[in-house]
Image (tube, grey):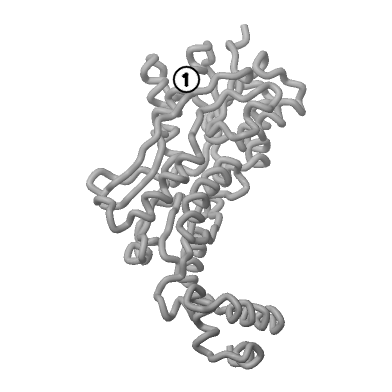
Amino acid sequence: MRDVAAMAGVSLGTVSNVMNHPERVGPETRDRVTVAMRSLGFVPSRAAGQLRSRRSELIGVVVPDVGNPFWATMLRGVETVADGAGLTMVVGSTHQDPERQRHVLHVLESQGVDGLVIAPIVDRAADWGSFEDRRFGVVTLERQAAGSAGAWVSLDNVEGARLAMGHLLDLGHRRIALVNGPSSVSWCAERRAGVVTAMAERGLGEADVLVDVVVDDLTVSEGAAAIAPLLDDRSVSAVMCVNDMLALGALLAMQERGLRVPQDVALVGYDDADFAPALNPPLTTVRQPAYDMGVAAAGLLLRADQRAPGEHVEFEPQLVIRGSSGPAPG
């Protein structure tokens, strides 16, 4: 700053005002200081400003996988609100790994973020407890327990999975693979509960219908690898995946084997990612309004001073029937 002040012929206080309160400096002086900064390659220190103001103007966002179009769209919703408030996102992925979740949260804590939006893959509130006292606190992208004071945004995962499985059962399928993530992940457990509910409503037992397939990460490659053995021995007539990335992997595995979808095996996903209607055949899936969920989460976060304990926004799922699901063979 001294070098900038000397080159521009102004005081240190003027340089500080140009950085923090430019409206207090005349246009000609401000331009002179800005030219000096550029000439010297001077970049103001965010860390120093944070120490003074105790605000970083950063919000942390933790999701399972930024490469998943659903989460990418949700992040866009958060970003839209954050941009409007002059805030910047710092984003991390957990990939369904509890230790990675803890690591990402530790990094965000060291960055001094002012608040946190998290889609936790393990419901350990202690992991993000240190963020509760930050400027904006915490908003989770999952339903909180009744009586909890935490703010949250979610979709009724039990109902969404009930709709998806009910659709396959009503088409006559009686041997169905459920490709799911670890039961420790809340929405994976909830979606399986919805599947079981759909079977119970029709008087069907798990053992008679369901083939559980559990993957470590909800990705295209995991979906393809997990479903391959069941396709090779033709032991299922339908596959339901708990996200569209897994469903895309399953579809690729089916096509590699020359299986017709849905004539030989039906397929249902979850999320209604942007690519779902463009697949061949278009994917039947459960729609989650990802962008709106991101906007709602960021809105709750920024209303930290006004939000009530346990305030939340819950969205309703919608089954979108397309060409990948059809009647059971025979």
Q: On the picture, is 182 further left or further right than 265?
A: left
Q: Nearer the viewer, residue 300 or 85?
A: 85
Depicted 9 relative to depicted 164: above or below? below
Depicted 10 relative to depicted 260: above or below? below
Horizontal and vertical percent position of residue 53: 40, 76
Rate crowding at label 1 as few (under 14), some (14 to 19) or many (20 or more) other CA atoms within 10 Å.
few
Is residue 149 shown to the viewer in this render? Answer: yes
Depicted 300 relative to depicted 179: above or below? below
Report the quarter where the C terminus lies: top right
* Mark 1 residue type: Asp
Residue located 44% across and 80% down the image? 51
Horizontal and vertical percent position of residue 78: 49, 50
Depicted 299 relative to depicted 34: above or below? above
Horizontal and vertical percent position of residue 326: 60, 13
Residue located 70% across and 26% down the image? 254
Report which residue position mark 1 lands on: 208
Q: Nearer the viewer, residue 35 or 177?
A: 35
Q: Nearer the viewer, residue 225 or 93?
A: 93
Residue located 53% across and 49% down the image? 75
Residue that sits furthest to the top in the current view? 330
Residue located 55% across and 26% down the image? 285
Report the quarter where the N terminus lies: bottom right
Q: On the picture, is 68 further left or further right than 116?
A: right
Horizontal and vertical percent position of residue 106: 47, 67
| Mark count | 1
Q: Nearer the viewer, residue 259 or 116?
A: 116
Residue that sits furthest to the left in the current view? 147
Query: Secondary structure under badge 1?
Result: helix
